[in-house]
Amino acid sequence: MPEYTRALVWFRRDLRNYDHAALYHALKQAREVVCAFVFDREILDALPDRADRRVEFIHASLGELQQALQAQGGGLVVRVGTAREEIVQLATEYQVEAVFFNHDDDPAALARDTAIEAALRERDIAVHHYKDAVIFEREEVLTIGKTTFSVFTPYKNAWFKTLTPFYLRAYPVDAWVDHLIPASTPIPALSDMGFASTNLHELKLPTGMAGGAQLFEDFLQRIERYQEARDFPAVKGVSYLSVHLRFGTVSIRQLAAAAWQQGGRGAQTWLTELIWRDFYHQILWHRPDVAAGHAFKLQYDALPWPNPAGHFEAWCEARTGYPLVDAAMRQLNQTGYMHNRLRMVVASFLTKDLLVDWRLGERYFAARLIDFDLAANNGGWQWAASVGCDAQPWFRIFNPVTQSERFDAQGRFIRRYLPELTRVPDAFIHAPWRLPVAEQQQAGCVIGHDYPAPIVEHAAQRVRALDLFKSAVARP
């Protein structure tokens, strides 16, 4: 017999009605289940731009989720307000005996959830929460000494040793959908929440569960080429599923199971990327201070970044004079997405060439990326800046020209986002300032007029970056 007469499922970063841990457990434990989502004002009001692609992606995905739940005999109640108040109000209004939700290990989310749980328990409403966003979380994969892994490869090996088919098994939600009740409310328009539409539709990024399934099916047709193609931004080599993973319109278990079962080199390489995601999530759980701007390697916490005047702004506005860096930043600014290889390149350039504090870049990505995930974003930036766990060694510094020549040899990606360089010959597309002035004029791209001159000289900045880290290493 079900334990509860009625329960509430609070959807968050898990916008799907299948293979959903909290939904499954609620349906199994309660005779009636109400589903709800809250546009949380604590999150919305902190966003710097009223035209935010993430809000629009969530909004579109909610419409599909509501329809899918209604087709199963249920519905979705959508509210706008502070989740701390709205969830308690919804639990009272619908007279539920328990609230179910999935984990979010962002420290701010944990604080919010703790406060909500306390308020619910004061009203004798039970609270249940579950792992859903990763394969292994928190303390499921530890060293032999029961400590946190800080190096990826040993973590990956332990991850595989822990993995069994059980951890990839889907939650059979369909077996219990007759417990859903048809509680729904209209989804407020973006404008009603103070937001405007973006170019999301023009970008043709498919939203919701159907969009995630479409992208996954497409990727499975070329997953075997992932190892060879993933580093080239002008090639269709990656999965493009990051935003769907972020908002849970796909199931991490389904994705990992497909890669594990396929077993080829491309699938295994992609599975390793999913394991990196688990790795950074468990780092965030064990070291929440990294989310507050602290370096994982504490000896670099107070590294005296020079932050030269104007360098950060030039990087943000794609005015560095290094084509691959500028093209990547335009991709981010225009689409909310950046290819993973380019995330490493631009982060290395900001920190090691421009000598700007990694925290500024991290915050800029957090504001712009449609697939922003705190754990992965923080981990990636600390990796690139050589201050994080298992980070790029500080003495290994990406050369932006070499990276460009290697991963965009014909300049296809560069020309896509820097049309002013369209007629620059391939031999000079990576360093157009080396093109003779007469040929610059012939190509319609005069350096310093049509396209910026390099803001810094890489070799000289490399020496300065090495000196900066040497001084930190030398300090007792």
Image: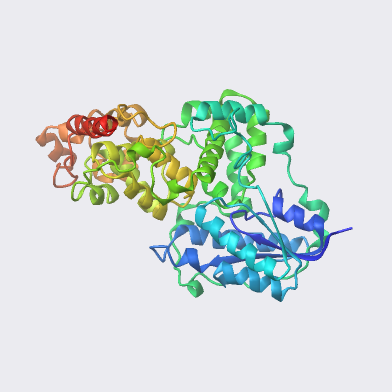
Residue at (32, 39) in percent of width and height: 414
Residue at (50, 57) in percent of width and height: 108
- Above or below, 168 against 41 in this view is above
Q: Is residue 29 visible?
A: yes
43 left or right of 420? right
Extreme residue toward the front, this view? 476
Extreme residue toward the right, this view? 1
- Above or below, 194 against 276 in this view is below
Image quadrant assignment for residue 39: bottom right
Image quadrant assignment for residue 117: bottom right
What percent of the width, then of the height, locates residue 305?
Answer: 25, 43
- In which quadrant of the rendered image does the N terminus lie? bottom right
122 left or right of 237? right
Who is closer to the viewer here, 429 or 385?
385
Who is closer to the viewer here, 446 or 91?
91
- Above or below, 86 against 427 in this view is below
What percent of the width, then of the height, locates residue 456?
Answer: 18, 38
What percent of the width, then of the height, locates residue 90?
Answer: 67, 72
- In which quadrant of the rendered image does the C terminus lie? top left
The coloring applied to the image is rainbow
Who is closer to the viewer here, 276 or 233?
276
164 left or right of 435? right
386 left or right of 5? left
Extreme residue toward the top, this view? 265
Residue at (77, 51) in percent of width and height: 173
